[in-house]
Image: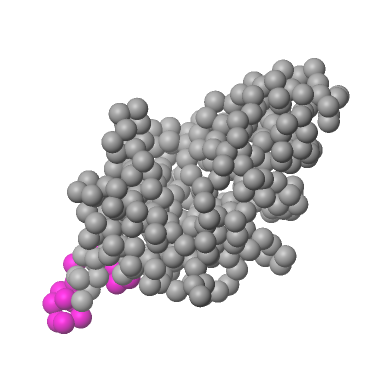
Amino acid sequence: MSDVPDLGPPPRRITVDVEQVSRLVADQFPHLADLPIEPVADGGWDNWTFHLGSEMLVRLPSAAEYALAVDKEHLWLPALAAQLPLPVPAPLAKGGPATGYPYPWSIYRWIDGEPAAVDRIADPVRFALDLAEFLAALQGVDTVGGPQPGVHNWFRGGTLRTYDEKVERALATLGSHVDAELVREIWARALGSRWDGTDRWFHGDIAPGNLLLAHGRLAAVIDFGTCGVGDPACDLAVAWTLLTAEGREAFRERLSVDDGTWARGRGWALWKTLSTYSRSFDDPEDMEGSANAQRVLGEIFSEYAAGAVDVANVSRSSSGRSEPSGSRSRPS
């Protein structure tokens, strides 16, 4: 019997509209009934998100699996917030199923900021260091009683083997659009690395849309639905999806990431990007998503190749040849 978790079938998402949200708020929080409600632009996939007045938002899970995170967030976000250097979402109230909506839902304080993007970041190295400081603080929070990997976060913090089939499925779909041999080599390196078994807190989805900027600087981190305790390598995927090469180096150094954890982080970035690319590469309506996936794959491939060159240089040096200036002995 396999010890690799089963992701199960894709979640069956439901839709929610403004009228339904208005009824939920009016029925369960009548003192807020007069506040205007509007959809949040790019409000996410796991939840439907709506402005509630100018200072709050309503967040409603879009499927039963995503609803598993509601109680977790209400329990743990206040505890985490007190120990983190940047603002994170503050749950204000929890609603229940009603008026045809079947899941628990939440009201949060609104956090101002614009989603991170490569061209919006004022100083890429400063951004990388600020993000590393945040993750270092998160990893330092006491993990006793913390949520272990499970369906509530799609097994973030657990083994990458959970996503092995997704990688192969994406390769089959993409065919000649990607270097399958190189992908399998990088993926095998990630699967072959060993986590030391020490639980640490992780966010689980350190992605551009969950990192908010103010004047080009990292200002807040949102959406902790996939958070938990376990292997924090999943939070390193951002090193390839958003950071520059120089920022990536500063990020890794600040977090003191060992080779194995770095390889697993690269693996998280790889499977997520392959999955996105396999859905968008032949979709004329998602050319932006396809182009971004190609960009990220390029970052992954070039960084991996550079690490291989560094190791080869050190190997030649150990055989009596001079070592080029600036080369590193760690394999990537």
Residue nearer the viewer, 48 or 84: 48
Measured as percent of width and height from the top left, residue 60 is found at: 67, 36
Residue nearer the viewer, 242 or 313: 242
Q: Is residue 132 above or below residue 282?
A: below
Marker count (numbered): 0
Measured as percent of width and height from the top left, residue 301 is found at: 27, 54
Q: Is residue 279 above or below residue 30?
A: below
Quarter of the rendering containing residue 39 = top right
Measured as percent of width and height from the top left, residue 236 is found at: 46, 56
Identified at 72% across, 18% down, the residue is 36
Residue found farthest to the left: 321
Q: Is 138 on the left-hand or right-hand side of 310?
A: right
Quarter of the rendering containing residue 92 = top right
Identified at 23% across, 49% down, the residue is 175
Figure colour scheme: one colour
Identified at 28% across, 58% down, the residue is 183
- Answer yes or no: is residue 248 visible: no
Q: Is residue 269 above or below residue 87?
A: below
Residue nearer the viewer, 108 or 3: 3
- Answer yes or no: is residue 63 visible: yes
Quarter of the rendering containing residue 223 = top right
Q: Name the quadrant of the C terminus.
A: bottom left
Q: Does the stretch in magenta take in 41?
A: no
Tell me the magenta residue range: 316-330
Q: Is 176 on the left-hand or right-hand side of 239?
A: left
Measured as percent of width and height from the top left, residue 203 is found at: 57, 52
Identified at 28% across, 36% down, the residue is 282
Q: Does the stretch in magenta take in 322?
A: yes
Q: Is 54 on the left-hand or right-hand side of 313?
A: right
Residue found farthest to the right: 31
Q: Is 232 on the left-hand or right-hand side of 271?
A: right
Main SS of the magenta segment?
loop
